[in-house]
Image: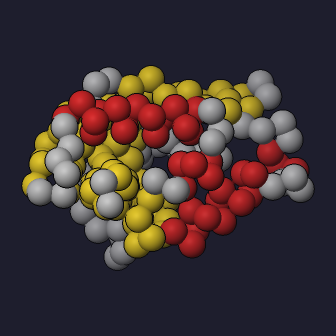
Amino acid sequence: MSVSKDQIIDFIYEEARMLDEGRHDEWLALWLTDGHYWMPLDYKQSDPINETSLLYEDMFMLKLRVERLNGARTFSQKPKSRCHHVIQRPFIDEMNGDTFVTNTSMHYVETRLDEQQLLALTARHDLTLVDGQLRIANKRIDILNCDAAFRNIQLLP
């Protein structure tokens, strides 16, 4: 089965919508079991292991994050944080058989109570076609001003 550019682009939009609507379990189901979510600390950082990152989470950590966000006793999330992604049309940089690489510029807003933060960022998705379904192999978020001081980022851009 082949995948069209439009299907890949729709996948990126649907992932952002899941996050905006707080459908974290559905979002987690998009991932491959060996996937990683990476948010580098430095501009053009190339190594998530030997250099400090804002975030580098495997599936175990992503599941813990989702459990915390869904938890009834997560008092730091009462009321819950909310987010909104405003994304540009994704670029598809690579289409090699069953693997795809996208690049999407976006503005991400996260809010809770009377605090709101806006991040300008670029998301790179490494996608793999598995049993006819696109899955996230890796996701990298490059924040434009990554070297600035941030408040806690509770959700996932």
Residue in front for this viewpoint, 46 or 122: 122
Residue in front for this viewpoint, 135 or 47: 135
Measured as percent of width and height from the top left, residue 143 is found at: 39, 41
Residue in front for this viewpoint, 59 or 116: 59
Work out whether residue 42 can be spotted.
Answer: no
Identified at 35% across, 68% down, the residue is 48
Left or right, 149 with reference to 45: right
Identified at 55% across, 38% down, the residue is 18
Measured as percent of width and height from the top left, residue 74 is found at: 84, 54
Measured as percent of width and height from the top left, residue 123 is found at: 34, 42
Left or right, 99 with reference to 73: left
Measured as percent of width and height from the top left, residue 61 is found at: 58, 68
How many labels sit on residues? 0
Work out whether residue 90 can be spotted.
Answer: yes
Q: Is residue 114 above or below residue 75?
A: above
Q: Is residue 140 above or below residue 35?
A: above
Identified at 74% across, 32% down, the residue is 112
